[in-house]
Amino acid sequence: MHKAASIAGFAVWLAAAFTPQPAFAEDQHIRDIEERLSRLRREPPTVDDLDKLVQRLTGCWDIAPEIAKTPGLVVTVRIDLKRDGSLAAPPVVINHSENPLFNKAAESAIRAVRKCAPFGFLPAATYEQWKALVVDFDPHTLVFPPH
């Protein structure tokens, strides 16, 4: 992102050098660009984007009846994505359980991520915020845990 800011600032400087205008206008223009770039870095994916992702994963997740009936059986998966929404690496289960159904639940969660990918609807402008996601696959509620 810093390269983009430098390149954008340099391009603005060149354009200003060939256009007669007061120096303060050039400075303000550069500050405006830097502020917009800064906002892009801070803005997380919208709730709508995350809702779309949850809906999509929920639709792709084939849950065995015995898993759906087991309380407390949660599989936490890390999903690393490329800017285009495709998988950057295979999804990884990052928790474990002694529950005998856990492996079956984990395999179904991994299959769901692979089946649903790519997630091209995620906005490229907020890529830094969603390039690595952690998702709890819980048969009772599919959520993004606080990490």
Image: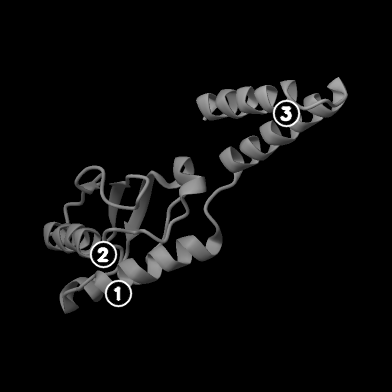
Q: Residues within 10 Å of mark 2 (few under 14, many from 20)?
A: some
N-term mark: 1 or 2: 1
| Residues tagged 1 and 2 counted as in contact (Cβ below 8 A) | yes
Q: Amino acid at mark 2?
A: Cys
Tell me: 104 left or right of 70: left
| Residues tagged 2 and 3 counted as in contact (Cβ below 8 A) | no
Classify mark 1: helix, strand or loop.
Answer: helix
Q: Which residue is at the front of the view, 76 or 85? A: 85
Q: Quadrant of residue 68?
A: bottom left
In this view, which residue lies farthest toward the bottom? 65
Classify mark 3: helix, strand or loop.
Answer: helix
The numbered disc on residue 83 is none
Q: Position of residue 126 (x, y in %)?
A: 51, 46
Q: Residue at x 26, y 43 (%)?
A: 88
Q: Position of residue 123 (x, y in %)?
A: 47, 54
Q: Which residue is mark 1?
A: 59
Is residue 147 visible in this depiction of the protein?
no
Marks 1/3: CA distance? 45 Å
Is residue 39 visible in this depiction of the protein?
yes
Residue 99 lies, with reference to residue 20, above or below; the image says: below
Q: Position of residue 87 (x, y in %)?
A: 26, 49
Q: Which residue is mark 3?
A: 30
Q: Residue at x 69, y 22 (%)?
A: 13
Marks 2/3: CA distance? 41 Å
Q: Amino acid at mark 1?
A: Gly
Q: Amino acid at mark 3?
A: Ile
Tell me: 15 left or right of 21: left
